[in-house]
Image (tube, grey):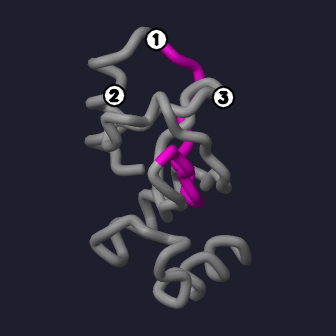
Amino acid sequence: MSIALNEGLRRGLPPFNSIEYAEGLAVDPTGVYPHGWIVIDGAVYDPTWPGAYLATYFGVTFDTEWIQIAEKATGRIGITLEWERYADLATAYLEN
């Protein structure tokens, strides 16, 4: 997750111990959507979806260090939606 987003979240929330970026599917009464969200101390925090309180989330979390590397290399976040764009970055990161 970008450093700016991480710092912004720290200013707007009570103290927390861990923060992770997650992607997968979000399900609400209107449908199923590919989506990204944040997991703070094990709980979903979704600042981009006003109806998040109605949603159920299914996905994977990503190491925030790697997310920052991927965001810097590609200029965006959206790993699971465009995996071909991130596969080489992920392989290189895992090999180190």
Dot 2: few (<14), some (14–19), or many (≥20) neighbours within 10 Å? some
Tell me where residue 13 sits by quadrant.
top left
Q: Residue 15, which numbered label?
A: 1
Furthest residue in direction front, as rendered:
29
Q: Is 77 colored magenta in this rendering?
A: no
Residue depicted at 44% across the width and 65% down the height:
69
Q: Main secondary structure of the magenta part?
A: strand
The magenta segment: 15-29
Q: Residue 42, which numbered label?
A: 3
Dot 1: few (<14), some (14–19), or many (≥20) neighbours within 10 Å? few
Q: Is 23 colored magenta in this rendering?
A: yes
- Residue 46: percent from left, percent from top: 42, 37
Tags 2 and 1 touching, CB below 8 Å: no
Q: Residue 9, which numbered label?
A: 2
Spatial distance from mark 2 to mark 1, Cα to Cα?
10 Å
Residue depicted at 42% across the width and 50% down the height:
1
Residue 12, above or below 14: below
Nearer-N-terminus badge (2/1)? 2
* Amino acid type of the residue tagged 2 in the rendering: Leu
Q: Residue 73, which numbered label?
A: none
